[in-house]
Every structure is written in C-alpha cells, then in structure tokens.
Amino acid sequence: MIKNIVFDFGDVFIDLDKPATAKAMESYGFTSITPELEEIFNAYEIGAIDSDTFIAKTNAIFPKANSKVLIEAWNAIILYFPEYRLHFIEQLSKESNYRLFLLSNTNALHIEKVKEHMKMERYERFKNCFEQFYLSHEIHLRKPNLDIYEFVLKENKLTPNETFFIDDTKQNTDSAAQLGIKVWNLEVGKEDVIDLKAKLQVC
C-alpha cells in the first residue's frame, strides 16, 4: 500500500524547454556538453559552488557571453506552471491520504526564475503542499545518485515499497527502483501528473 509520494518538479509540475539553454548559447560557441561543463553544472546543482562562481566559470569557457547573457540563457529552460496542476496538488494535500514530498535537481538561479514566473504567492501555495521540499542545491545531493533517495527515506522514516516516486527522467526512476521504491517514469507530452491516482491503482 502506498503511503508516501515523492514528486520531481521540472516537467512534472512546471513545464520546461530543455533544449532552450543550448540553443541560446550556440551563437557563443556552445556545441555540446563537455566533461568540464558537466562538472561545473553538477557542482552548481548540488550547491558546491555559488551562482557567482558558476557564472564566472562558465564565462571563462564562453568569453563572448557576458553574465547577463549567461543567466538569461541558463534560465531559458524555465517555462510555466499550469494552474490546473497547482489545484491538483493542493487537493491531494488537502485529502491527507499520503505523505507528500518534493525532490528536485535544481539550482539557485533556476529556483529564483521559478519564483519570478510563478509569483511568490503561488510558489508558497505549492511549497506548502509538501511535508518536505528538497532541492538538490540545498541538500547537496542529486539524482540519480542512490544517496539522495536513501537520504529522503531515512530522514522521513519511509518504507521503500510504501513510497511512490514520479520523475520524467528514466535514469532517476531506475535508480530509485533499485532501492525498492515504486516508480512512475512520466512521459512528458503523453502523460500528466494529474493522472496519478490511476497510476496508484495499479501499484
């Protein structure tokens, strides 16, 4: 029986344009994510470096792009949070049938952009739906590493087979499943988080 639900954020609740950052940086020399860039991105995502350091390191690789350009390109991925999804999670929270958690790989610049898009009143309404609101740059852990799921389970005394995890990235749901967590790898554009109850019925 499922008692706990852990949600991803991007492309589960808030819409993303994942190719947007790469596209915005093409004219500044971006062609692909190199090992150096991946190291910088991952460090930023777990809060190992702050935003100023992140921008400085990225700027050193793309000297033709100033900090304003880099921040705009980085945040181009963030789109909108449909109102019907906010209503859905508020209703689910109100019903109190499950313990609800958010677990997101994100960073300081992106979460500030999210707040700007959503407006603080809507962001706080969303955040208040969850018992815990875990952002990778604040807890210094990231998906798909097993330690992030172990952290959530241990911190909240959750039993894996009573826990349901929703994420749009298969690598993330695959790693959670290794610990015995029930998972839903949500297919963006084909499925929607509001279909959750139908998914839970087949667990």
Image (cartoon, rainbow, N blue to C red):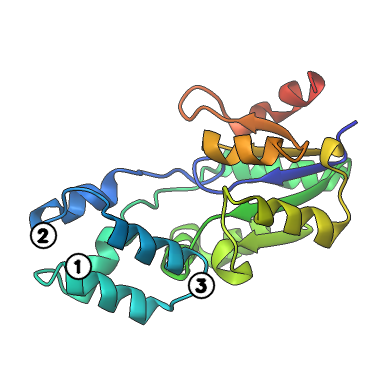
For mark 3, what is the residue?
47
Label located before the other in sequence (3 or 1) = 3
* Mark 1 residue type: Val
| Percent coordinates x, y for residue 99 in the rendering | 84, 48
Hey, which residue is sitting farthest front in the picture? 35
- Looking at the picture, tell me which residue is in the foreground, 69 or 174: 174
Q: Amino acid at mark 3?
A: Gly
For disc 1, the marked residue is 69
Task: Provide the secondary structure element on which disc 2 rests.
Answer: helix
- The image shows residue 20, relative to residue 112, as above or below, that is above
Crowding at mark 3 (Cα within 10 Å: few <14, some 14-19, many 20+): many
Q: CA distance from mark 3 to mark 1?
A: 22 Å
Spatial separation of the CA atoms under disc 2 and disc 1: 10 Å
Q: Which residue is mark 2?
A: 28
Q: Judge the density around disc 1: few (<14), some (14-19), many (≥20) Cα neighbours within 10 Å.
A: some
Q: Point out the image quarter for the C terminus.
A: top right
Which one is earlier in the sequence, the residue at label 3 or at label 2?
2
Instruction: Compare residues 21 and 34 and report the one nearer the observer.
Output: 34
Label 3 – label 2 distance at C-alpha: 26 Å
Q: Is residue 74 visible?
A: yes
Q: Classify mark 1: helix, strand or loop.
A: helix
Q: Within 10 Å of the Cα at label 2, are there few (<14), some (14-19), or many (20+) other Cα atoms?
A: some
- The residue at 61%/34% (across/down) is 174
User: Marks 1 and 2: in contact by CB < 8 Å?
Assistant: yes
- Name the residue at 69% across, 32% down: 183
**Left or right, 31 with reference to 163:** left
Looking at marks 2 and 1 on the same chain, the residue that comes earlier in the sequence is marked by 2
